[in-house]
Image: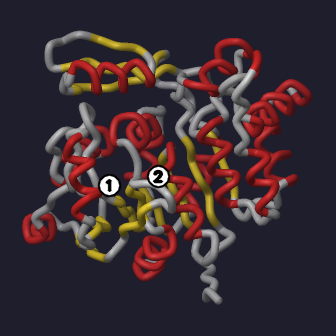
Amino acid sequence: MYDKIDKKIVALGGGTGLSTMLRGLKKYTEELSAVVTVADNGGSSGILRRELDMLPPGDIRNCILALAETEPIMEKVFQYRFTEGSLNGQNLGNLFLAALNGIFGSFEQAIEKTSEVLAVTGTVLPVTIENVQLCAMYDDHSIVEGESEIVQVCKLDRKHIKHVWLEPKDPKPHDKVLEAIAETEVIVLGPGSLYTSILPNLLVNGISDAIAGSKAKVIYVSNIMTQPGETDYYSLEDHIKVIEKYLGKGIIDYVIVNNQGIPKDILELYVEDDAIPVTYHKDKLQESGIQVLEAPLLKILKGTTLIRHNPDRLAEVIISIV
């Protein structure tokens, strides 16, 4: 049994990091808003985006399912991915959102109706409803457009990202996102890919200013491991420095970091893939005015060697700040 709180929480991100965290937080509050990047252009989401001229549904779907209060079989259905025929690679949940988008002519309504069907706790919001593409300039001044293309270049060419932006520039934020930020008491950034999950939210016009102007406590959840090509050898301080480039300095109040050891056999696999644990200097961070909260947050996904945050332990730390 979890003690409910009456605090409002806004969590910004994308990918698996955000949805993982939401599974833990929903046990403590119904006043939970997930703000999700819509820059994804790969896989099933990318195909639907290109062919149906809709926002990418994948990260939205994962967050809806993370907040759903429904039977396990329904989650399996919505996560089902076809493996044969013309639907090969397509995800049923994405197609469900696409169908509702077609019926109502609105991606916002598609999210709302899906949330009703799955009895979602809280609210899932796209950071913008405009069709945007993530762009990156590398240290050799080459430019790549598209989230999946940026990730591919990072992995294959090991180029260092110098700057990111959205095209078209300064997209309008979703009105409900600004409302949620203005009314919330806690804002959580991460965990998730620095350049492709967290920053795309901050690049939407007005979002960084809204966070900076908020009276809410701002928390950054550190990734456990670096990402090959994207954040090679980045320390926690490096991650924060990049975020502050777009958010502004002195905005982050807390960082949450994992202090649990990683099993040797799993760590070796990550190191072979050029990923290492994110290091940090607690004293230096606290001297800069950021409070550091350490906790054993490691979880190995069952039947795999994949490292994730433990959603329940992470939620406990966040709630302790609230």
Amino acid type at mark 1? Asn
Amino acid type for the residue under numbered disc 2? Gly
Q: Could you tell me which quadrant the N terminus lies in?
A: bottom right
Instruction: For mark 2, give the secondary structure.
Output: helix
Classify 10 Å Cα crowding around label 1: few (below 14), some (14-19), many (20 and above): many
Quarter occupied by residue 157: top left
Name the residue rendered at 70%, 16% in the picture.
53
Q: Which residue is mark 2?
A: 17
Circle nearer the N terminus (1, 2): 2
Is residue 286 shown left or right of residue 6? left
Q: Are marks 1 and 2 in contact (CB under 8 Å)?
A: yes
Relative image position of residue 51 (x, y in whole percent)? 71, 12
Q: Secondary structure at mark 1?
A: loop
Q: Residue 67, how many percent across, how many down?
A: 68, 60
Q: Residue at position x 31%, y 38% from top?
A: 246
Identify the residue at image location x=27%, y=52%: 225
Q: Is residue 213 visible?
A: no
Instruction: Measure the alpha-carbon separation of dots 1 and 2.
Output: 9 Å
